[in-house]
Each structure stands twice: as C-alpha cells, then as structure tokens.
Amino acid sequence: MARAPSLLAREAPVKGSFDILIEDGFVLSELAGVVDVLRIANRISQNPVFSWTYRSIAGGIVRSSGEAMVETQPLPQRPEVDYAIVPGNADNDALDAPLRRILMVYKNRATRLFLLSEAASAYIQSTGKGNAHTTHWENRMAMAEQTDATEWGAQLASDHDGITTCAGMGATVDLMLSVVQSHISRPALMTISDVMLHDRIRDLRTPQPFSRSETEITGDADLDACITLMQANMEEPLAIHDLCRMLDISSRSLERKFSRRLRMTPNSYYRELRLNKASTLLLNTSLSIREVGLACGFASGFAPLYKSVFGRTPAETRRQQRTPAPIAHPKG
C-alpha cells in the first residue's frame, strides 16, 4: 500500500487535537469519516493520540441532514488546536456566514484548516481560488450553471496557503489517513486502513471518479467511451446514431452492450444521466425549472418526465428541499 503524500507543511506533534465545526444540515458520513479514523487510531495505539471537540458557531444541539443530533461547544475566541475541520452541509448556503467566522478565528492561529465538499465550495466562491482548490464534482457541476467553474480543481484534495479543500464523502477517509500518518507508525496506519476496509490510501491528487478524462465504468471500451460522450453532452444531447458514428460502432451492437452490461437501452441510460443532473441543479441552484430543463437537454416535457421517474414534480422537489423539518431541541 503506497504511502499517500502528507498535506502537512510543518512537522506535526506526537499528539493531535481537532475542532470539528458543524452547523444544522451537516453531512453525517463526512463527520463519521473524520471521527472514525481518529477513534480507531486511538484504539490501535492504545493511547489517546487524538482528541477532538464538536463545535458550532453558537454551541448547543446541531442536527445532521439525516437528523442525527450532536452536542456542540461554541466557537472559541482563541482556539488552541492543531486542526480544524469543516464537513459539508446539505444546504449550500448554510456555511457562508459561519465559514467567514471560522476563517477569522482559525486562519491566523497555528491551526491547519480542512474544508470538505460544500465548505470547500463556499470558500472557493468567496475567494475566487478555484484553480488552486477542489470540491466535490457534484458541487462543481451545480456551480457551473452560475459561474465559470471550469478551472476548479477535480482532485480528491488540494492544499494552498495553509487551507486544504477536499471533495468530502469517501475522500474524507483518505484525507484523514493522510493527516494521522504524521502522528502514528506506519503499521498502525495500515491497520486503521484495514479496519475501515479501505483497501488503499489514495493519493490526494487522484481525480475524482466522475471527473476522470477517461471514464472506466463498465470495462467495455466502447461502452465507456459512449458514456463519456453522454456525460459531456447533456445540455445538447447527441442522437444515438451520432454516438454510434463517433464510436464507429453499429446501433445494434451498442444496444447489445448496454443491455448486457447495464440492463438498459442507450436512450434510457442517457435520459437518466440528464435527469440526475437536473435533480442536482434543482436542489443546489436557483435556476428556474425551465432553465434546469434546458441545461439538461429537455426543451419540452421536462416536468412530466421528471415526475414519472422521481415520483414528484420539479417544483415539489424544490419546495421539499427549501422547507426542512423543524430542528427538535431537547428540553432542559
């Protein structure tokens, strides 16, 4: 298992302390990716190498997008930790104001700051440093409808000016393994990876799967090339016969490949790709429903087609996202 390059610019102390900064709507899987690596490292080391504190701007109970509740401490005035980590959030706008406070409090301290997924997106938008940082490909795709995101990084993580941005989700574990390796032995690191069933620690410069220049999804070269063309042409979809011409393959052969490998027709697969993109744009942008349809290649008939697949109209999807359930705070 190749050693992933550490993102740490300075020599890390033997022990490491973390502030984990969350707000209502935080992504639970990313929080778990952070804490589980630290928890397992402590268990394997048989020594509390790492300590962590859950924090939010105001303190108190904070609820994840999946309704898990976490008790937090308020943001400190003078943090004395080695690392501060901000997981992503289901609400793209929820981190804008908190992130400004977090940067103000932590950036001038001797603290390494890690921003995951939506937190990374908020930082990129506020600084315009997309060419030096990265975020999750889904966020980049959503933002591309509002701003030029073509130069935004597409790797798992990127470090610049003392701030590390990361795609989050599964890459959170790779990031944390890269961080803790500066504190623990190589055998301990390998054991943590094995306990988490993480078969290898990916180089943090690795492109995110959806952002690879050559898609390898099915193992069939023609099929993978076809899917790559589909992903690159969603706003103005290509006709299947044009795809076949570009791939130098017969339509009958392409249909057989889709049926055998994916159990779908080429048209059905292409349509589902575009509808999934439409769902992302509805939930993550302020584009009108018509604009979302056009951006995904649906000049007409978008709403009924969307409802036939997802069971609700585009308008209902957007209303549901904008009307979250009330936060339940325990009494006493």
Image (cartoon, helix red, strand yellow):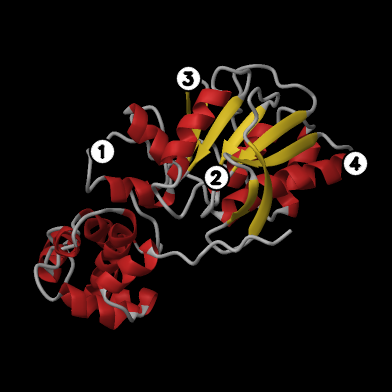
- Residue type beneath disc 4: Gln
Q: Nearer the viewer, mark 2 or mark 3?
A: 2
Residue closer to the observer: 175 or 259: 175
Compute the Cα span from label 4 to label 1. Answer: 46 Å
Q: Which mark is residue 150?
A: 1
Residue 98: which disc? none
Q: Secondary structure at mark 4?
A: loop
Type of amino acid at the residue the image marks with label 2: Pro
**Residue 106, percent from left and from top:** 57, 25
Q: Is residue 199 visible?
A: no
Taking the image as shown, residue 83 lies to the left or right of residue 229, namely right
Pointers 1 and 3 in contact (CB under 8 A)?
A: no
The 10 Å Cα crowd at callout 4, few under 14, some 14 to 19, many 20 or more, is few
Cα distance between the residues tagged 1 and 3? 21 Å
Q: Which numbered disc covers residue 161? A: 3
Q: Which dot marks residue 87? A: 2
* 21 relative position to 167: left or right: right
Mark before the other along the chain sequence, 4 or 1: 4
The answer for how far apart the CA atoms under marks 2 and 1 are is: 24 Å
Q: Earlier in the sequence, mark 1 or mark 3?
A: 1
Q: Say few, some or many: other residues with alpha carbon within 10 Å of mark 2 (under 14 / 14 to 19 / 20 or more).
A: many
Relative to 322, does residue 185 appear above or below in the rendering? above
Which is more foreground, mark 2 or mark 1?
2
Residue at the (70%, 26%) spot, across then down: 81
Which residue lies at the image location 74% right of the left edge and 58% below the top edge? Answer: 332
Earlier sequence position, callout 2 versus callout 1: 2
| Relative height, residue 181 to residue 89 (above, below) | above
Q: Earlier in the sequence, mark 3 or mark 4?
A: 4
Q: Quadrant of residue 21?
A: top right
